[in-house]
Amino acid sequence: MYTLQLAHGTDGNRRWMMAALVLSTLALTQADHAKAQAEPNVRWGTYENLFSARSPWNSRPVSPVFGEYVIPKSSYSPSVAEGAWSTGVFLAGENDPPVTVSGLPGTAGVWDPDAEVRRQITIPRWPAGVIPASAADGHADIVDPAAGIVHSFYKLRQIDGNWVASQYAWTPLNGRGWGNPAHYFQGARAAAVPTSGGLIRKHEIDDGRSHYPHALTMSLTYNGLSANPTYIFPATSADKDAATTNTGAIPQGALVMLPPGFNLQSITTPALRKVAETLQIYGAYVTDRNTGTPFVIYVENGSGFNLHRGGWNNAAANDLERIRQGLRQVTGVGGWIDGNGEPYTPETNFNLLSMRGPWRLQSGMTSGTYETWRQAVVFPPTPVPSSVVNTSYRGMQPLSWALPVAGQSYQLTARTTGGGLLRFQLRDKTSNAIVYDSNNLADGETARFTWPAGNVGPVVTATSGVGVESTVAGDLRREGP
């Protein structure tokens, strides 16, 4: 049984995870896996079909186990809708011009949660016709196949012809569509995913299929969302005040589904029958919070999707209420099937080390800077080696499901170019003593060590090469399953 929490804080939890993954592999031999078929004619990692075949968005669970909690009623009827609180998805062409996005008036710039700085952001290809959602969140995602990136904006709008936004994040177009410990914030939703992830797309609504070919994205309101934990794998974040304002039981990152026993024939609205069948096959990931609606499933803006065309539709409202009563959180699965119909075990051992700053020049002439799209510290050509150090401990985001474990073995691999060097140290936060030191590592060199006990934090040093541009990054993962 492979559970979806994956929050490991003890050796016992690590051993449990190893056993769980073995059982997951065995479960893939079940007959229902053998019958699984790939979604037809799908090219993954494209504007039409976002992310890889093994993204959680494009995977479906086998033999899911369900909790008993029922999403409660709230002020309004459940909703499946485009509109002011949804998002548009815009395709950047290779010849589209660059656009610089500034921060909202009165701010120092656009907040970049990966780099953890405010700055102007120049998007190299900006398509014509970008229209942010009209409500306060101002969501818009831009897909750039040439760069292999999905750009995701929060509170994007134009003021006097200039683009401004509150926040910017990005995710690889052919990636998972979810954050990881090193690059933990990859989109504008509270769960740190792009708003396009799980979105019902315009081209999917009347495509002739009985279900959508991916998991859906869903928000709950305060009385449905959990205060502890506020998020679980694969989410990497939640609303800042979730621990003090949520009163429900479902964390962000949770997968909710309609169990096999749910009667799809009870859903009489054709547009909702397709949604319900998708919820029975793939489910929906909880990625955001709304105010007063038991659940909202989001549809791409400009799709024309409208359950209440011409006025309030009692039949659709009743169907949505049946879906609300039927939805359950998935607490474990027997395995997973990817978008190509192949059984697989999802990755859970991710890089823990980010190269975000702040960086301080320690020696030499030229400081390096962190570039989020390259996930590395970048130095311009310099005549002598220059070293920068980050003592803020922000090189490792303390994700609840990926915390380092004392006594566990880890491997650090340097990823550098141009002669760059990486050094990783662990400092005891109480005594300030250095309790581990990798010393300088060149590209491809590794260091293995056991995570020490106590309250320790990373001190990271990047050193440039000489005469050419150089980059420094690292990959830190636990050894073993």
Image (cartoon, rainbow, N blue to C red):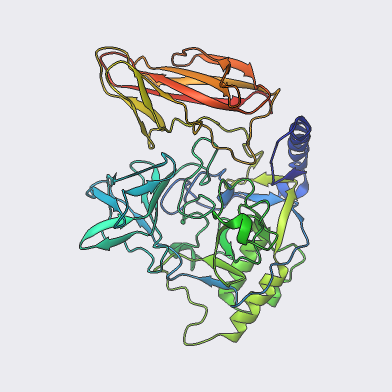
Residue 231 in view, yes or no: yes
Above or below 73: residue 11 = above
Q: Determine whether 142 is above or below 135 in the image.
A: above
Residue 439 or 170: which is nearer the viewer?
Answer: 439
Residue 147 horizontal/vertical position (percent): 34, 41
**Total labels drawn:** 0
Q: Is residue 129 visible?
A: no
Give the x, y percent position of residue 11.
76, 30
Please name the residue shown 64% across and 77% down the image.
319
Quarter holding the N terminus is top right
* Point 58% across, 76% down: residue: 270
Q: Is residue 33 above or below residue 324?
A: above
Q: Position of residue 138 (x, y in %)?
A: 39, 62
Looking at the rendered image, the quarter that the C terminus falls into is top right
Viewer-closest of 125 and 282: 125
Q: Is residue 30 left or right of residue 280?
A: right
Left or right: 118, with 350 as reference point: left
Query: Going by the image, does 443 lie left or right of 65?
Result: left
Above or below 282: residue 74? below
Residue 390: x percent and y percent? 44, 27
Residue at figure coordinates x 62%, y 17% from the top left:
449
The image quadrant that residue 451 belongs to is top right
Query: In this orientation, which residue lies closer to the viewer: 300 or 44?
Result: 300
Left or right of 235? Residue 67 is right
